[in-house]
Amino acid sequence: MQSQVRARARALHETPVFRAFLMSVLTLAFIILQAVAVLAKPESLAPLAEKISPSVVNITTSTMVEGRTGPQGIVPEGSPFEDFFREFQDRNSDGDGQQPRRSSALGSGFVISEDGFVVTNNHVIEGADEITIEFFSGLELKAEVVGTDPNTDIALLKVEATTPLPFVNFGDSNAARVGDWVIAMGNPLGQGFSVSAGIVSARNRALSGTYDDYIQTDAAINRGNSGGPLFNMDGEVIGVNTAILSPTGGSIGIGFSMASNVVTRVVDQLKEFGETRRGWLGVRIQDVTEDVADAMDLAKATGALITDVPDGPAKDAGLQTGDVILSFDGVDVADTRGLVRQVGNSPVGQTVRVTVMRDGKSQTIKVVLGRREDANSDAPVAPENEENPAEVSPQTTSLLGLTLTPLTDEMREELAVGDTMNGLAVTEVDEASEAFEKGLRAGDVITEAGQQKVVTIAELEERLTSAKEAGRKSLLLLVRRAGDPRFVALTLAE
């Protein structure tokens, strides 16, 4: 009996009517699930904006500036209206045309703690005599500067309030993906509290700073938004709105926010010390290009090539010019930008392992990091250690598109290089040569070839011959200009 029932059920399932019914049920279920998913999404950003708005502030700064004589900036010099505007200005001045005046500026910021710490851009408050913070509620309080960091354009302020202030937390900017929704808030063009939405357009942008790590967004950012927060959809700050790229001065959808993972480290140091304390390795470096890698017989073009080691932590530890830094504190070094940021984020006084490639072999050196802010960035390049060789008769030759001659005392004085520097001076560069294309110019001094010192023409020719015999396609030169060194790889003729 049961077998007959099962057989009938099986036969029913195989009928076209049942199949059509089953497909209808599945289609209806799919449509219902889609509707539920749509309803689960927020219809508006209003709830999130209402939640985070109280933590965003408008910043007004006031600065006394010197008065100016005459109608500068009003009419062109020599204009027939110049006398008229000068007379008008004199009637409205204190008589000497130098009456000080108060200048105001606007910006944005956000509160990061209930006891009144406020983050904004350094350029918003730089040089200000008085800083006023206006809260979303209309409350206004005077602020004091805790500390600033011009390198990342971040400033930390402090206000004293009688009650706990609404604040927001930082999020992980590294978790932000291109295409994620973001919200920018601030005081654009002095119009008061404003919200704009967009997406993360790009990550890890660099503008001009050493420690840049910008999030690019198309959320509208205009003048006055500087210092305001960039939020993710969880209401966490993942960036500080800093700059825009625009030919008109207004938003065209290319805005930049300093990543929160950079900002948090700066804020923590400003809060603790009132200043930044970045790690310092003490080397001058350049990227390893394909031709440089070939000239040094490296497996791939990666790492940071040391061009000079002035007095500092690296020199004390034994790092040398020509070393290629492959890893720093266990992290592979892709290029100079990555190394600079990693060193700067490291604690002062920390002992780190630096792995370098030297003479074709890898070795690890321990370095105790100094403090970047204590380093004298304008320190002169350390002179060469070897004694001056005996004077040789000046001679001139042309190699690799360069006309070269050994340095003499007269040339050292003319080129303003150290008395102890030795090498070959470039007196002329063929404009059709690779050397000219790669930036070599008359007045440059070549101090090394093939990572060995060169003082005479004969030594350079020997380096060229050795490179060709070793099967190298190019020769690596250490070139100094006004004391600043860099490596240049020039292709060897077949």
Image (tube, rainbow, N blue to C red):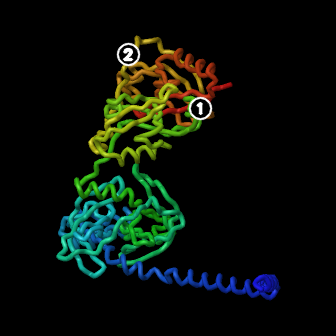
Residue 32 left/right relative to 275: right
Q: Residue 467 carries which label?
A: none
User: Residue 308: x percent and y percent?
Assistant: 40, 32
Instruction: Report which quarter residue 475 is drawn in.
Output: top right
Q: Tell me the residue that label 2 is attached to.
A: 388
Tell me which amino acid carries mark 1. Asp
Q: Are marks 1 and 2 in contact (CB under 8 Å)?
A: no
Instruction: Report which quarter residue 481 is drawn in.
Output: top left
The N terminus lies in which quarter of the figure? bottom right
Up/down of 411 relative to 335, above or below = above
**340 or 19: nearer the eye?**
19
Where disc 1 sits, the SS reads helix
Up/down of 449 relative to 222, above or below = above
Q: Residue at x 32, y 38 (%)?
A: 351
The C terminus lies in which quarter of the figure? top right
Q: Which residue is drawn at 56% across and 30% down?
A: 429
Residue 26 left/right relative to 294: right
Alpha-carbon neighbours of circle 2 within 10 Å: few (<14), some, or many (≥20)? few
Tell me which amino acid carries mark 2. Asn
User: Residue 298: x percent and y percent?
Assistant: 56, 32
